[in-house]
Image (tube, grey):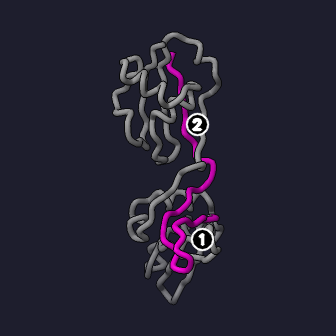
Amino acid sequence: MLNNWVVVPTCLPLVLRRCHVCASERFRTSGKFRVNANHKLIDVWLLALCTACGETTKLTVLERANVRSVRSGLLARLHDNDPALAAELLQDPVVRRRNRIALDWDDAWRLDTGGSDHLDREVIDVSVRFAARIPVRPVRLIAEGCGLSRAEVERLVVEGRLVSAVRLSGRLSGDFTFTLKR
């Protein structure tokens, strides 16, 4: 029987960018937007606060865009400070590249295994799905989901008792499956 695990975000990730005031490298965003319209042009920024000094930085979402080119639904979500929109925009590679930022997902996600009834089986087939593009080491997910240490999971990989079609070393942010034989 195939077990389904889901990696779910619990909050917005930290933004990794150097603070120009205190040289800290972490910003926390609350999902607030700053919208500025000048005649027919609109600028939109996602606001983030430095975790060390509280300085505000603006992450550019739209710059000098024609107001008519912005969908009314998107504009309403921006004015409402929609946190789901903030999460979507933080994951957008164009926004991240434009602002030269990276994301820190530590302590911003959880693994939902659907219970622990699968742990006593001899063979476990698991499908892992990501609700958001969260880069996580598969060894860490498997260790957490099966109640094992990371060293034990790595030993099972070497012994061939933990197999997957994807490489289990490194980080993944896409769905994968694995089979564990005890």
Q: Which mark is residue 135?
A: none
Q: Residues within 10 Å of mark 1 (few under 14, many from 20)?
A: many
The span from disc 2 to disc 1 (Cα, nearest Å) is 28 Å
Question: Is residue 68 shown in magenta?
Answer: no
- SS for tag 1? strand
Which amino acid is tagged 2?
Leu
Which residue is rendered at x = 56% and y = 62% of the image?
A: 86
Give the magenta range: 1-30
Whole-percent x and y of residue 174? 42, 41
**Residue tagged 1:** 50
Element under disc 2: strand
Front-most of residues 52 and 133: 52
Q: x, y percentage for residue 82?
A: 62, 62
Please name the residue shown 49% across and 31% down the image: 150
Front residue (pair 162, 40): 162
**Viewer-closest of 40 and 172:** 172
Residue at the bottom extreme of this rendering:
39
Disc nearest the viewer among 2 and 1? 1
- Disc number placed over residue 111 in the picture, else none: 2
- Identify the residue at image location x=41%, y=41%: 172
